[in-house]
Image (cartoon, rainbow, N blue to C red):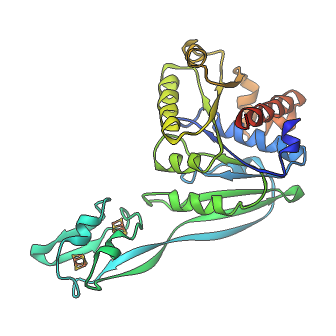
Amino acid sequence: MLFKTHGDKQLKIAIASGKGGTGKTFVATNLYSVLQQNQVSSILIDCDAEEPNDHFFFKSISKTDKEVQVNIPVISAESCIFCDKCYEYCHYNAIFYLPSLQQIHVMEDLCHSCGACSVACEHNAITEKKKTIGTVTTYLLSGNYKLIESRVNIGVYSPVPVITSAIKEAEQQGIIILDAPPGTSCPFIHTVNNADYVVLVAEPTPFGLSDLQKTIAVLHILEKPFGIVINKSDIGTLAMSDFIQKENYDLLLSIPFDRSVASFYSEGKIMAEREEKWKEIFENLIDKIIETACK
Ligand code: SF4
Ligand code: SF4
């Protein structure tokens, strides 16, 4: 088994999908379970910071929370000479600027903490304060395995700093599974950009194919190698497998629909722990991923 010998090197594998509900977490948690069962050095990071749910699938012994803080600029209207510069530098339209009424302040919910306004201001009108935007929780599992979870506070515009902190917590050798946020926006891009290889989980419906194509286009721009898992492979159309074949992409696994799997999943149970058949399916999948990622 390839994955048993890979534990001494670091390999980051992102499990991603163009939209939610395709079975991404099912794949990520089952992969992590077979790595644990085979005592492979590994870690699971839930990067879906807006809706993390990997922890429902594992029993934890203990957990520790770390707050994630960012710098938010504070503008002093008294020191400001209303020169426009910070307003022009802010690419996120996060500065409320009304010079005619001598009004200027930062709209915290829109601020991305990029620091550009502080650099722009030559009149010492901008200071910074800390703001907590989320939490990174480390769950200690049996066998000294860990699940790291990113969770952004409600109302925060970008979960990217929280995801970054979660990924930084896993500076260790072995296989690191990143359960990526759905979609193709900044949180997804940031997560897959940290990965050596991306597994795309898709359902074979017309919408699923369209999302898959969009996601692949982003991965091409990022120059990330990837393979595809088709979930519920027998209840959609053949257009997705035709597309994968035509483009010569790597089809890593097809998972037919199984009502009992859906039912166990909804109860927070891992199939690779329940049935030998599923354990083997995910052992073969991780082997295939390593083989494809390292070729
Ligand atoms: S830190 Fe960046 S995003 Fe925030 S107000 Fe300043 S320029 Fe805009
Ligand atoms: S750059 Fe400084 S002085 Fe100019 S508008 Fe912004 S805060 Fe005021």
**Image vertical order of residue 147 relative to residue 20, above or below:** below
Residue 203 located left or right of residue 65? left
**Where is residue 75, by image quadrant?**
bottom left
Residue 81 located left or right of residue 185? left
| Residue 56 location (% of width, % of height) | 72, 49
Dividing the image into 4 quarters, which one contains the C terminus?
top right
Dividing the image into 4 quarters, which one contains the N terminus?
top right
| Residue 31 location (% of width, % of height) | 77, 40
**Residue furthest front in the image:** 295
Residue at coordinates 70% horizontally, 30% vertically from top-left?
262
**Image vertical order of residue 238 relative to residue 166, above or below:** above
Q: Is residue 266 visible?
A: no
Q: Is residue 207 visible?
A: yes
**Image vertical order of residue 178 relative to residue 264, above or below:** below
Total marks placed: 0
Location of ligand 1 given as a quarter of the image: bottom left
| Residue 227 location (% of width, % of height) | 65, 30
| Residue 175 location (% of width, % of height) | 77, 48
Residue 238 located left or right of residue 221? right
Instruction: Please name whichever residue, 48 or 176, is drawn nearer the observer in this view of the structure.
Output: 176
